[in-house]
Image (cartoon, rainbow, N blue to C red):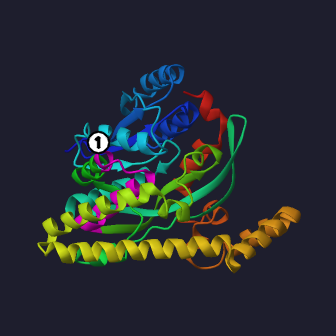
């Protein structure tokens, strides 16, 4: 029988966030994670030592390899993460890999299903399931969950790369083939991509190389909090009109075009035109969406709802509870729905939630 540790590697970069590692390792131990784990640690010396001790403690139950990484002090936001991932992917020995942050929870039961699928479907380049984003707030060492919403994932199963790019899904945290993930981060590092282009490039490589499958099982729990917003990408409008964007865009378009030529044996001019169209569509949709959220009626309505919820908190909590009973995936993945025992996702969601919110986890190493 093949050992699962030889099939998939979790690739996780971290920096100065030992409490988040304790929670993540606790979840992995609770769910008996059988897969390999590669931890790229760019922490300061004191927390780096704490991380080593943590890996030694949890290493009795988990297959963790701890890789210290010295970040460059003058890199722009996201660049050191790209270099770290490029270095880590060079160490991966399994045919499949999944990247996520130290405050993300990729749920082991659904990982098993995705791994089995990927091994038997060579025309697919990624697999995942449904995902939820939790809004959280730190209270000392504890984490309070204030709400939850769907983090959109979808299948993209068209037969050619152009159609897959035009209907692209967010696959950054999906289970992927190691060769594709390694190529995307290696190239992103070599090209000097910022966080924005690095993320899009990794996604486009996945779309070019094959189809993407999304199962109906809950696959991922992500956390939104102050600690993971400090290094966010710049505003999309500012990013598109920056010198960095102008410099990186031709490199991005040419690289993806060359992949399509190699994959589908079409003229380079056709491939470039396809990538340009798909990328243009992505930018136009993103810019229009961001505009309406900031200045349009959607933005005004969101501000009104926020003021109403602040002034009359029970209106918001009551509405969220009622809405969670309505049909539809967005309501099915609300926090209120996931907390009900009759939810098909309740059990595996609760395993992650307990490790996120229970302060005892931090003292039970």
Whether 207 is among the magenta residues is yes
Q: Identify which residue, 348 or 90, lies in the foreground.
A: 90
> Viewer-proximal residue, 15 or 288?
288
Q: Position of residue 195 (x, y in %)?
A: 44, 51
State the image quarter where residue 134 is shown. bottom right
Residue nearest the viewer, comparing 272 with 176: 272
* Left or right of 109, for residue 272: left
Q: Which residues are magenta?
A: 188-211
Residue 87 falls left or right of residue 119: right
* In this view, 58 is above or below 4: above
Describe the element under mark 1 as helix, strand or loop: helix
Image quadrant holding the C terminus, namely top right
In the rendered image, residue 241 lying in the magenta stretch gets the answer no
Please identify the quarter of the rendering in which residue 250 is found: bottom left
**Where residue 296 sits in the image (x, y, percent)?**
67, 78
Which part of the image, by quadrant, shows the N terminus? top left
Residue at the right extreme of this rendering: 311
At horizontal 50% and vertical 60% (from top left) the residue drawn is: 239
Picture residue at 39% right of the left edge, 29% below the top: 69
Q: Can residue 27 be seen by looking at this rendering?
A: yes
Q: Looking at the magenta stretch, what is its main secondary structure?
A: helix
| x 24%, y 51%: residue | 183
When the figure is inspected, residue 83 is found, relative to residue 333, above or below; the finding is above
Few, some or many residues within 10 Å of mark 1 (<14, 14–19, 20+): many
Asked if residue 174 shows in the view, the reply is no
- Residue that appears at 65% across and 46% down: 226
Judge whether 74 appears above or below 55 on screen.
below
The residue identified by callout 1 is 89
């Amino acid at each position: 029988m093949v050992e699962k540790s030889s099939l998939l590697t979790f690739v996780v970069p971290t920096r100065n966030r030992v409490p988040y590692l304790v929670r993540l390792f606790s979840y992995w131990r609770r769910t008996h994670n059988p897969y390999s784990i590669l931890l790229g640690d760019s922490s300061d010396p004191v927390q780096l030592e704490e991380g080593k001790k943590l890996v030694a403690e949890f290493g009795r139950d988990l297959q963790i390899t701890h890789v210290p990484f010295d970040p460059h002090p003058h890199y722009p936001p996201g660049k050191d993460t790209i270099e770290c991932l490029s270095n880590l992917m060079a160490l991966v020995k399994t045919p499949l890999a999944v990247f996520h942050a130290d405050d993300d929870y990729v749920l082991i039961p659904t990982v098993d299903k995705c791994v089995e699928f990927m091994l038997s479907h060579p025309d697919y380049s990624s697999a995942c399931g449904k995902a939820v984003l939790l809004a959280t707030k730190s209270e000392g060492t504890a984490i309070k969950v204030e709400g939850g919403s769907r983090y959109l994932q979808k299948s993209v199963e068209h037969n050619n790369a152009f159609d897959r790019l035009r209907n692209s899904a967010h696959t950054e945290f999906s289970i992927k083939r190691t060769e594709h993930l390694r190529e995307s981060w290696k190239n992103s590092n070599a090209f000097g991509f910022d966080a924005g282009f690095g993320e899009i490039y990794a996604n486009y490589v996945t779309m070019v190389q094959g189809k993407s499958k999304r199962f109906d099982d809950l696959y991922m729990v992500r956390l939104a909090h102050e600690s993971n917003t400090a290094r966010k990408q710049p505003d999309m409008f500012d990013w598109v009109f920056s010198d960095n964007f102008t410099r990186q865009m031709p490199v991005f378009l040419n690289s993806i075009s060359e992949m399509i030529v190699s994959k589908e044996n079409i003229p380079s001019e056709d491939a470039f035109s396809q990538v340009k169209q798909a990328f243009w569509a992505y930018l136009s949709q993103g810019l229009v969406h961001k505009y309406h959220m900031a200045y349009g009626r959607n933005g005004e309505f969101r501000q009104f709802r926020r003021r109403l919820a602040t002034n009359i908190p029970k209106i918001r909590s009551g509405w969220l509870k009622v809405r969670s009973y309505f049909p539809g995936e967005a309501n099915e993945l609300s926090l209120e729905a996931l907390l009900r025992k009759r939810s098909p996702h309740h059990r595996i969601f609760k395993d992650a939630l307990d490790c996120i919110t229970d302060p005892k986890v931090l003292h039970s190493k």
